Amino acid sequence: MSSQGSRRILLVDCDSFFVQVARLEDPDGAGRHPLLLVGGRSNRGVITSASYAAREYGVRSGMPTRRALALCPEAEVVPVPRGACVERSRAVREVLHELSPVVQAASIDEFYLDLGGTERMLGGEELAATADRIRRVVRERTGIAVSLGGGTQRVVAKVATRLAKPNGVHVVAPGGEAAFMARFRLSDLPGIGPAFLRQLEEKGLSTVKEAAAVEAEWLARWFGPGRGTWLWERVRGIDPSEVDARDRRKSISSERTFFEDIDDDDELERRILQLSCNVGRQLRMKELRARTVTVKIRDHDFTTRQAGNTQPEGLETDRAIFAVATSLLHQLRHRRRTGVRLLGVGVSNLVRQAASAQLDLFGDRIALESERDRTIARAVDRIRDRYGREALRPARVLEEPDK
């Protein structure tokens, strides 16, 4: 890896990726609609992506389809072309591997590149020129239009794509990181979610410039040492994280949208158990454990809330994940009791199974799962692998548990 001061980082962001793929897959249908929405077409559907023309009407991703059509009644709604999206994403990534020594997929439509050390190979080409060349090659080879942000830090490259869209390039010169970041609001920074944003607003902070004026000591007092340091660095455009070509999985999640809102706690717990089983199975398949469990709720009015809990040791069993997730569900329900349209369970802070085991030398810590629990969970996995997923299930997840 290149040194922090000389890093040349780009973020390649596929513009309205799902819209582009839908148009490429159906040029005579979706391809002819300037006001195109991709997502669920039912009354309970949600928009995954909107064309730039539709966005001018106020339509945004994550918006209920019914609301989007009220804002833009002439829009055409098409389903997400999932298989084609995976293929197009893979094609973009293959091209990028030819153009950059280090490529990390941040999502299906975002890729970080580290071009540090390529200056001599590229004949001293400026990063902005390199970015523009990559933009043109990706479009020519895959049909996908991309925007690129660049700089010496990942966070700067990420935020710079906001100014590059659509189908453009914006590169921040070395030394200009802090001045560049100062033009944005805190809500524009990656990693600042709704809960943290509310905490910042309670302290009278809404812009990067306002947060940058606060001393590091006070940020640590207000938000804790870890988060305070993180914020102090990010508002100055400092991001020590590397572009990791190994592309390690950072989180696993499972969520469901219901045909009808659910307002019964017992039924929500049953659904949480199903989701916990899905997540636990994925963890064990990848030989991982998770220290952080998060529960996500989307209420009937599309208000999205979440809560998380971090454990001292990694978890991998359905039972342990369910125990933490149920507690988080109760917290969220206590704050607001209303119909739930979507429920999700996610895990993060992933570690390898062998690396997460710790000895409790004093015997005073109560573990959520034992080695016996883990052995049983893996034995159940083997039975399901042989006889099918339905061979063994918790009684509580059955449609008619009394039977």
Image (cartoon, helix red, strand yellow):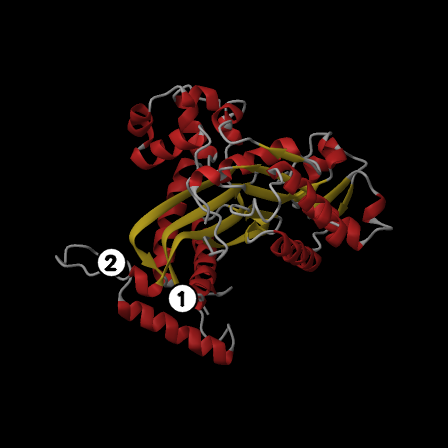
Q: How many marks?
A: 2
Crowdedness near tag 2: few (<14), some (14–19) or many (≥20) residues, C-alpha within 10 Å: few
- How far from the left and from the top, in percent, is residue 164? 65, 34
- Compared with residue 15, is residue 391 higher up or lower down, i.e. above or below? below
Residue at the image position 47 percent from the left and 45 percent from the top = 296
- How far from the left and from the top, in percent, is residue 106? 54, 49
Quarter of the image where one finds residue 318:
bottom left
**View extreme (bottom): residue:** 386
Mark 1 or mark 2, whichever is nearer to me: 1
Q: Which residue is mark 2?
A: 367
- Which type of secondary structure does the marked residue at label 1 adopt? loop
Give the amino acid at mark 2: Ala
Q: Which residue is mark 1?
A: 287
- Which type of secondary structure does the marked residue at label 2 adopt? loop
Q: Is residue 286 left or right of residue 256?
A: left
Crowdedness near tag 1: few (<14), some (14–19) or many (≥20) residues, C-alpha within 10 Å: some
Residue at the image position 56 percent from the left and 53 percent from the top = 101
Residue at the image position 51 percent from the left and 64 percent from the top = 399
Give the amino acid at mark 1: Glu
Q: Is residue 312 left or right of residue 155?
A: left
- Compared with residue 170, is residue 26 higher up or lower down, i.e. above or below? below
- Which of the two discs, 1 and 2, labels the residue nearer the N terminus? 1
